[in-house]
Image (cartoon, rainbow, N blue to C red):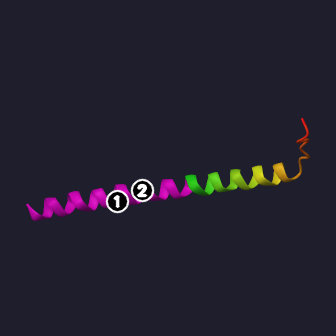
Amino acid sequence: MANRKNMNIANALQELKNEIESTSRLLEIMESILARNAESNSSKVYNLDN
């Protein structure tokens, strides 16, 4: 019984680790998109008089 419980805990921890790694990759992608957008926006000239 304890072995089965430990296996369930180990599986849950592995799933959590996988989710954290996926989230981390998504955050890295989002950061690179934001950085590219910032570079793109910094090269634009806005007319704020309108």
CA gap, disc 2 to disc 1?
6 Å
Q: Is residue 50 magenta?
A: no
* SS state under label 1: helix
Q: Is residue 19 magenta?
A: yes
Q: Residue at x 70, y 50 (%)?
A: 33
As shown in the figure, which amino acid type bears the numbered disc 1? Gln
As shown in the figure, which amino acid type bears the numbered disc 2? Asn
Which residue was labeled with disc 1?
14
- State yes or no: discs 2 and 1 in contact (Cβ < 8 Å): yes
**Main SS, magenta residues:** helix
Q: Farthest residue toward the left?
A: 1
In percent of width and height, residue 45 lies at 91, 46
Near-viewer residue (31 or 9)? 31
Boundaries of the magenta span? 1-25
- Residue 27 position by quadrant: bottom right
Which residue was labeled with disc 2?
18
